[in-house]
Image (spheres, helix red, strand yellow):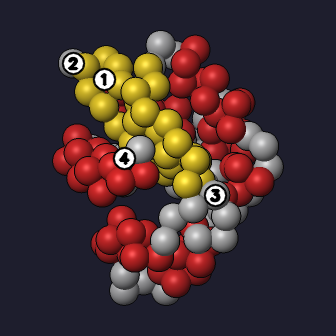
């Protein structure tokens, strides 16, 4: 099934100049970039994006980190895109992420883990709509 998903290359990925290395992995897998932009996200949109974490201890640190620099927003499209991307991204905790995954290869900490990827069709649809103003 052809579907779309949202990817965010987080400020640490941008600062560490990992953009090309990460994007090339998706392209080599046969996924298509439908939209791509660099943006500086505001806390309002990030609080909506991460609302399920609002009452967790790390929430404010996450918002501070995500507003600390530019990000790359990407809408990818392809067959079984969401499942494929999630497998490529790896576990949220980079110390649990398998070598060969994006987080396993590039992430240094739980908060600064280089990438966000939608985890379901509902999340992808909501996130693409939420960040549409940046494209």
x, y percent for residue 45: 39, 69
125 up-or-down from 88: above or below: below
According to the picture, the residue beneath numbered tag 1 turns out to be: 80
Q: Earlier in the sequence, mark 1 or mark 3?
A: 3
Residue drawn 37% across the image and 81% down it? 54
According to the picture, the residue beneath numbered tag 3 turns out to be: 70
Circle 3/circle 2 CB separation < 8 Å: no
* Quadrant hosting residue 39: bottom right
Seen in the image, is 126 located left or right of residue 69?
Answer: left
Disc 1 from disc 4: Cα separation: 13 Å
In this orientation, which residue lies closer to the viewer: 128 or 57? 128
Disc 2 from disc 4: Cα separation: 16 Å
104 up-or-down from 41: above or below: above
Disc 1 from disc 2: Cα separation: 6 Å
Q: Which numbered mark, 3 or 2, is in the foreground of this view?
A: 3
According to the picture, the residue beneath numbered tag 2 turns out to be: 1
In this orientation, which residue lies closer to the viewer: 62 or 101? 62
Circle 1/circle 2 CB separation < 8 Å: yes
In this orientation, which residue lies closer to the viewer: 42 or 91? 42
Seen in the image, is 96 located left or right of residue 105?
Answer: left
x, y percent for residue 20: 70, 31
Assess disc 4: are there few (<14), some (14-19) or many (≥20) residues with their C-alpha within 10 Å of its C-alpha. Answer: many
């Amino acid at each position: 099934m052809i579907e779309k998903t949202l990817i965010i290359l987080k400020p640490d990925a941008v600062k560490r100049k990992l953009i090309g290395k990460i994007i090339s992995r998706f392209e080599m897998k046969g996924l298509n970039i439908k939209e791509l932009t660099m943006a500086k996200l505001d806390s309002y949109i990030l609080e909506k994006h991460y609302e399920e974490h609002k009452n967790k201890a790390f929430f404010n640190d996450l918002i501070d980190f995500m507003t600390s620099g530019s990000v790359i927003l990407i809408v990818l499209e392809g067959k079984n895109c969401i499942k494929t991307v999630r497998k490529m991204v790896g576990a949220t905790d980079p110390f649990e992420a398998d070598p060969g995954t994006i987080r396993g290869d590039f992430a240094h900490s739980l908060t600064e883990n280089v990438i966000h990827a939608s985890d379901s069709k509902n999340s992808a649809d909501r996130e693409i709509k939420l960040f549409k103003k940046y494209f």
